[in-house]
Each structure stands twice: as C-alpha cells, then as structure tokens.
C-alpha cells in the first residue's frame, strides 16, 4: 500500500474565524502516526461549516478525501432506525411497551429468548438480552446474502445474554428486529421509511440504506480498506468498498456523508425530528457495560463524557473498512463528524475510537482548542 500524504483541505464554506488548528494536527497525526489511509472531519457551529482531511481517498490512485465523499456509517444507522420507530410511536402505530412477540409473532424464542418479555424500548436501548448475531462470524460466512429473518435465526441459535431488563449488552440483533417491526407496522421497506421520513425532508442526498444486496456506494466516495481485525501491523489489506450490506441492514448498513450526518444530528438534537415526549424517551439513557468507556446509551443515541468533563451526544459506527464518529453538544449547535477509510490504527491509538475521542476534545472542549 502506498504511504498516504498528510495535509488538510478546507471546505468551500470554511470560515477563518473558527480555529480548527488542533483538529488539523490530529488529522495529520492519524495518517503519519496512526497509519490510517485517509481521514476526514466536518465541523458545524451554527450556520458555519469547516472541513478538513488528511491522507488519501484511494491508495492506488491517490486523491484527497472530499466533503462530498460518501462512506459506510455502520451503527450510526441505528439512530436513523430509532427515529423512524419513535415517529411511529408518536403516530400511535405502536408503543415502546409493545412486545416483540406481539409485533413479530414467532420471531424471537428459544435458548432463553422470550419475545413476550422483550419490549420495543429494550431493543432500542440494548437491554433486551438478545444475543448479537455478529458474534457468530462462522454463521455469517455461510452464504452470499442474508435476510433479516436469517440474521435473527443466527441469534436465536445461541443463549440469551440475560433476562430482558436485567443488564445491558450491545446487540445488532436488536436493530434488525426494530427494522423488521418498522416493515411489519408500515407495510413498506425500511429504506423507504428512512427516505420518506428523514433523508428526503432534510435534503440528505448522500444518505441512504442500500436495497437488497446492492454492494456499491453510489456517487463520489473513498475506497474502504480492512485488515479483517488482524493485529499484525504487516497484515494484508483488503479493499472492501464493494460489500454485501445484507448482514448489517438496520443495524449498520447505511451510507452517508459527514455533512449529511451533521445536518441529521443537528435537527435531531435540537428537537425538530421528534415530538417532545419521544425526544425525552430517546435521550433517557442507561449505563453501558463492556462498551466504550464513559458512555451511556439512550434509544439509538449515546453520550460520551470526554476527559475534562464535557459530554458529547451522537453515535459512532464501525464496519469493515470504515469507522465513523458523529457527536456534538446536546443542543446540536456544535457538532463534528469524523471518518477513517480503514479499520485499524498504529502508534499510540488502540483503534480509531482513540483518534475520534481526541478530535472531539479538540473541537468541543474550549481548553483543548489550541
């Protein structure tokens, strides 16, 4: 792989009045010390926008990562799905107390799983105890594509993690079930509901949930690279830009841009996507266990307390070849989205989350903006 060249690139709407020097240095370090192929960040402060990048979009052809570049957003998909569910709740088409057994009869059962005891709220905040199907990588390598029902069946073949409500464990199965509930309640594809309710009204032209097994990233985008979680610094690197999204779907299959994510979260955090009751429900959090340090989790959103005490709100996402963080202030007025087009790091960071946390500190904590 060719060695990426560092260097930040300002967005056309960048303003000199906002100092992002500390973030710029971190982007360069992510490439020169962290070893990522390329990294981009877009910040939003009110109506002001700033964009920076380092490294390359393509390790063979080169080229800078650009504001219009689309990338796979992994678990940030969960926030979009949770908004759709909560809008349906506000429309009285379901409630957070409805059980999975009521909404999806026969889908969840066996090995300690009991859909009659699991509420929609427990799916959205990961207190259901449902096994995470992505922990069974052998089962996920048995076929070309997967239906949501097949992903749930993988989970049901394993013991439940705990009784519903008795703990917290991040489970992608929860959001596959949430996506199935959306489709059952509306009679429409989840991709259509996300488009009609969120991306089209907000003008998020670079954001979508791929349909079926469409492996492409349509529109301008960077290449996505993975070492398949191999810790060896010399491990082989694979280009996974074209990838079957069906194993991820409602849990992590969406594609977006940094600018679109900033716009989406700005609208969400400021209360313009949900009525007040559902907004309160979304941002009512529970403690997390064995996840990212200093975090809490609501309904598809999380908070992270940064060193120094500042709390940021949003969501992160990891998928083969692409890691992202989209977090900002609770009022949505100050926000930053960061993405790397590789899923490994070297140097002093254990994984891209370390880079992202440092970027959040530099952007959101006044004492670190220097």
Image: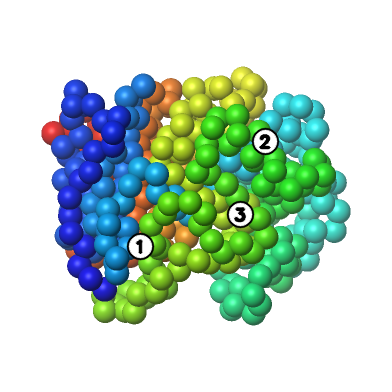
Counting from the top left corner in percent of width and height, residue 130 is at 66, 57
| Residue 303 location, quadrant | top left
Please name the residue shown 56% across and 74% down the image: 137
Camera-nearest residue between 201 and 33? 201
Camera-nearest residue between 139 and 219? 219
Q: Earlier in the sequence, mark 3 or mark 1?
A: 3
Q: How far apart are the alpha carbons under marks 3 and 2? A: 14 Å
Secondary structure at badge 3 equals loop
Q: How far apart are the alpha carbons under marks 3 and 1? A: 21 Å
The tag on residue 196 is 2
Q: How is the image coloured?
A: rainbow
Q: Which residue is mark 3?
A: 210
| Residue 25 location, quadrant | top left
Extreme left residue here?
370
Please name the residue shown 60% across and 34% down the image: 200
Q: Is residue 260 left or right of residue 20?
A: right
Q: Can residue 288 be seen in the rendering of this structure?
A: no
Q: Is residue 49 left or right of residue 205?
A: left
Quarter in which the N terminus is drawn? bottom left
Dot 1 and dot 2 residues touching (CB under 8 Å): no
Question: Where is 367 relative to 54, above or below?
Answer: above
Counting from the top left corner in percent of width and height, residue 82 is at 62, 40
Foreground tag (1 vs 2): 2
Please name the residue shown 79% across and 28% down the image: 92
């Amino acid at each position: 792989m060719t060695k990426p060249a560092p260097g930040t690139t300002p967005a056309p709407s960048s303003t000199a009045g906002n100092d992002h020097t500390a973030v710029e240095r971190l982007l360069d370090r992510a490439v020169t010390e962290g070893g990522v192929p390329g990294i981009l960040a877009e910040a939003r402060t009110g109506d002001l926008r700033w964009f920076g990048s380092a490294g390359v979009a393509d390790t063979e052809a080169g080229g800078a990562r650009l504001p219009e570049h689309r990338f796979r957003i992994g678990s940030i998909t969960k926030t979009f799905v949770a908004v759709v569910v909560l809008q349906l709740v506000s429309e009285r088409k379901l409630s957070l107390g409805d059980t999975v057994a009521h909404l999806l009869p026969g889908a969840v059962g066996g090995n300690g799983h009991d859909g009659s005891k699991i509420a929609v709220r427990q799916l959205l905040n990961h207190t259901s105890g449902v096994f995470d199907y992505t922990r069974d990588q052998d089962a996920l390598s048995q076929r070309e594509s997967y239906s949501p029902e097949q992903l749930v069946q993988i989970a049901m073949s394993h013991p439940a993690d705990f009784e519903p409500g008795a703990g917290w464990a991040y489970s992608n199965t929860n959001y596959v079930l949430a996506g199935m509930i959306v489709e059952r309640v509306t009679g429409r594809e989840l991709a259509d509901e996300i488009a009609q309710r969120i991306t089209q009204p907000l003008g998020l032209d670079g954001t979508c949930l791929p349909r079926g097994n469409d492996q492409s990233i349509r529109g301008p985008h960077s290449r996505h690279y993975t070492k398949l979680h191999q810790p060896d610094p010399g491990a082989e690197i694979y280009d996974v830009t074209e990838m079957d999204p069906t194993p991820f779907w409602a849990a992590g299959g969406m594609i977006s841009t940094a600018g679109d994510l900033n716009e989406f979260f700005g609208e969400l955090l400021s209360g313009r996507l949900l009525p007040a009751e559902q907004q309160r429900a979304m941002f009512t959090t529970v403690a997390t266990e064995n996840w990212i340090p200093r975090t809490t989790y609501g309904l598809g959103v999380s908070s992270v307390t940064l060193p120094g005490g500042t709390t940021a709100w949003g969501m992160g996402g990891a998928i083969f070849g692409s890691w992202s963080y989209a977090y900002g202030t609770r009022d949505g007025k100050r926000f930053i989205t960061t993405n790397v087009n590789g899923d490994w790091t070297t140097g002093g960071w254990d994984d891209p989350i370390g880079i992202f946390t440092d970027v959040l500190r530099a952007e959101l904590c006044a004492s670190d903006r220097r």
